[in-house]
């Protein structure tokens, strides 16, 4: 169809990324929803502004957990509200390409179909593209004529290692460590060193401002938190050393898992990976020098993507515009019971 609306969608634990073919533009919004009982109060970026600030009777959460759909109904609401901002008249019969995790069960695949064909969104054709394939296409990897490439995506709640060779993913592993765990580790370090409890949003701000895994500078930031002893609000000067200690705890775990993963790879593929370097992407790779730090730990070189969290949706954009790449997209259909 000439005016068929086609979307590339990456549902992440931290944010939803949507590419609209008609507008030829990608949109990013927080994957969060604020609710009070059955009443929806805020969605997306507005809900994130309420995170860790809302009263106890208002729940602010993400419908995704570790890269998988945890709450089907809420995820549909988040996606629908975001798509209404992109296209006022959604219509019916759109084509949706979803970036999905590997090794999904039939029920988990059905969840993506249900999100695109539920209460608000209807009569849409759904295709799924494995996330490492989408990442590899975005970073310019030639998947078909490939002797061995490794793609690492460090996301909000999980890190995925994948080996692509001969046009398919031969081995993959996901570990539950990502940006949120880094934020929590920073909060834990601040509590341990200063007897001060801070929120994960504050931990994230400290990570983005002072997080440096190499070439560390003597920086400090003033934060406000709750005193662990008195329970009263208190200001404290937090040093970059404490912030980086929290980040390194998580990055060292990722590097150790990666080293073990690389040891399982056949030598000829490992040689090819060492020659072209490991492809590194994901929102949590914004931390300065993370590629150099991992290189010193594992002994491999890294190709750091400048797309960060939008790499998967950029790969979907390529698939939408290039018919030859659509063979990587598998249709999801409604199964009759």
Image (cartoon, grey):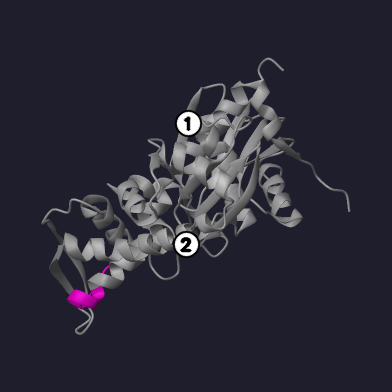
Query: Does residue 162 appear to the left or right of 286 in the view shown?
Result: right
Query: Percent x, y for residue 311?
Result: 48, 37
198 in magenta: yes
Q: Residue 138 in magenta? A: no
Q: Is residue 186 visible?
A: yes
- Please give the range of residues in magenta: 191-199
What residue lies at 41% left-to-right and 36% top-to-bottom? Answer: 307
Residue at horizontal 28 percent and vertical 47 percent from the top: 289
According to the image, label 1 marks what residue?
26
> Element at badge 1?
strand
Q: Are marks 2 and 1 in contact (CB under 8 Å)?
A: no
Question: Is 89 or 176 nearer to us in this picture?
Answer: 176
Q: In whole angstroms, how far apart are the C-alphas of marks 2 and 1?
A: 33 Å
Q: Nearer the viewer, residue 324 or 41?
A: 324
Horizontal and vertical percent position of residue 215? 18, 50
Q: Is residue 80 visible?
A: no
- The quadrant of the image that shows the N terminus is top right
Name which of mark 2 and mark 1 comes first in the sequence: 1
- In the picture of the structure, the residue carrying the numbered disc 2 is 257
């Amino acid at each position: 169809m000439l005016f068929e609306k086609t979307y590339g969608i990456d549902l992440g634990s931290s944010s939803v990324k949507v590419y609209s073919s008609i507008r030829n533009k990608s949109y990013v919004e927080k994957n969060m929803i604020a609710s009070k009982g059955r009443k929806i109060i805020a969605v997306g970026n507005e809900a994130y502004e309420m995170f860790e600030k809302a009263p106890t009777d208002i729940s602010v959460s993400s419908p995704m957990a570790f890269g998988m759909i945890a709450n089907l109904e809420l995820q549909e609401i988040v996606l629908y509200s975001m798509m209404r901002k992109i296209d006022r008249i959604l219509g019916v019969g759109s084509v949706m390409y979803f970036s999905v995790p590997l090794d999904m069960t039939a029920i988990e695949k059905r969840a993506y179909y249900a999100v695109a064909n539920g209460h608000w969104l209807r009569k849409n054709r759904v295709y799924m593209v494995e996330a490492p394939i989408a990442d590899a296409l975005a970073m310019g990897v030639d998947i078909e004529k490939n002797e061995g490439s490794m793609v690492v995506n460090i996301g909000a709640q999980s890190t995925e290692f994948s080996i692509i060779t001969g046009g398919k993913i031969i081995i993959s592993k996901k570990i539950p460590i990502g940006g949120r765990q880094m934020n929590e580790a920073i909060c834990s370090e601040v509590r341990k060193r200063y007897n001060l409890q801070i929120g994960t949003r504050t931990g994230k701000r400290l990570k983005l401002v002072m997080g440096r895994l190499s070439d560390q500078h003597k920086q400090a930031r003033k934060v406000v938190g709750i005193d662990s002893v008195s329970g009263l609000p208190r200001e404290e000067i937090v040093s970059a050393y404490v912030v980086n200690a929290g980040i390194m705890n998580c990055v060292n775990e990722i590097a150790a898992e990666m080293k073990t993963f690389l040891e399982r790879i056949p030598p000829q593929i490992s040689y090819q990976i060492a020659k072209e370097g490991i492809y590194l992407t994901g929102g949590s790779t914004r931390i300065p020098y993370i590629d150099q730090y991992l290189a010193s730990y594992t002994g491999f070189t890294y190709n750091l993507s400048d797309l960060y969290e939008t790499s998967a949706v950029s790969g979907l954009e390529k698939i939408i515009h290039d018919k030859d790449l659509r063979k990587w997209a598998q249709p999801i259909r409604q199964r009759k019971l």
